[in-house]
C-alpha cells in the first residue's frame, strides 16, 4: 500500500502547489512527524512544529517516496542518483539545492 502524502498535492505523483514540474515527483518523510510531504512549504503550512532534518544515522531507512511508482527509497539511494532505481522516472536535479532543509549535512 502506498503511503499517504500530506500537503497540497495536485496529482497522484506527489506534485504540489509549490513544485509541479514533470520531474517534481518525490515526497520526503519528515523526521519530526514521520509524515510524507512533497516539500518544505507544504510541511510548514500543515504542521505547527518546525522541521527536523533527517539525521545521517537514519539515511539508510525509507525516507523518500517516488511519486511515479510508489517505491520508498532510502535517503542514501535517493541522493546517489537522478532517477528512481525501481522505475527509472527522472527526479528534479534542482532538489539538490534544498537538501540542507531535509537532511542533516
Image: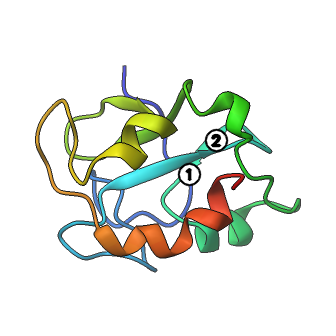
What numbered label is drawn on residue 91?
none
Residue 71 x, y percent position in the rendering? 31, 29
Would residue 98 be found to the left or right of residue 12 on screen? Answer: right
What numbered label is drawn on residue 6?
1
Assign a secondary structure to mark 1. loop
Q: Is residue 19 above or below residue 48?
A: below
Would residue 104 be found to the left or right of residue 95 on screen? Answer: right
Label 1 CA crowd tier, 10 Å (few <14, some 14–19, many 20+): some
Q: Nearer the viewer, residue 36 or 89?
A: 89
What numbered label is drawn on residue 35?
2
Q: Classify the position of the N terminus by image quarter.
A: top left
Mark sitting earlier along the chain (1/2): 1
Q: Classify the position of the C terminus by image quarter.
A: bottom right
Residue 99 x, y percent position in the rendering? 56, 63
Among the 4 quarters of the image, the one containing residue 70? top left
Q: Residue pushed farthest right? A: 49
Amino acid at each position: 500500500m502506498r503511503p499517504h502524502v500530506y500537503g497540497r498535492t495536485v496529482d497522484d505523483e506527489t506534485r504540489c502547489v509549490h513544485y509541479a514540474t514533470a520531474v517534481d515527483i518525490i515526497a520526503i518523510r519528515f523526521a519530526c512527524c514521520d509524515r510524507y510531504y512533497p516539500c518544505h512549504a507544504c510541511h510548514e503550512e500543515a504542521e505547527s512544529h518546525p522541521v527536523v532534518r533527517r539525521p545521517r544515522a537514519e539515511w539508510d531507512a525509507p525516507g523518500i517516496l517516488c511519486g511515479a511508482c510508489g517505491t520508498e527509497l532510502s535517503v542514501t539511494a535517493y541522493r546517489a542518483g537522478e532517477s528512481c532505481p525501481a522505475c527509472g522516472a527522472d527526479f528534479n536535479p534542482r532538489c539538490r539545492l534544498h537538501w540542507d532543509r531535509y537532511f542533516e549535512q
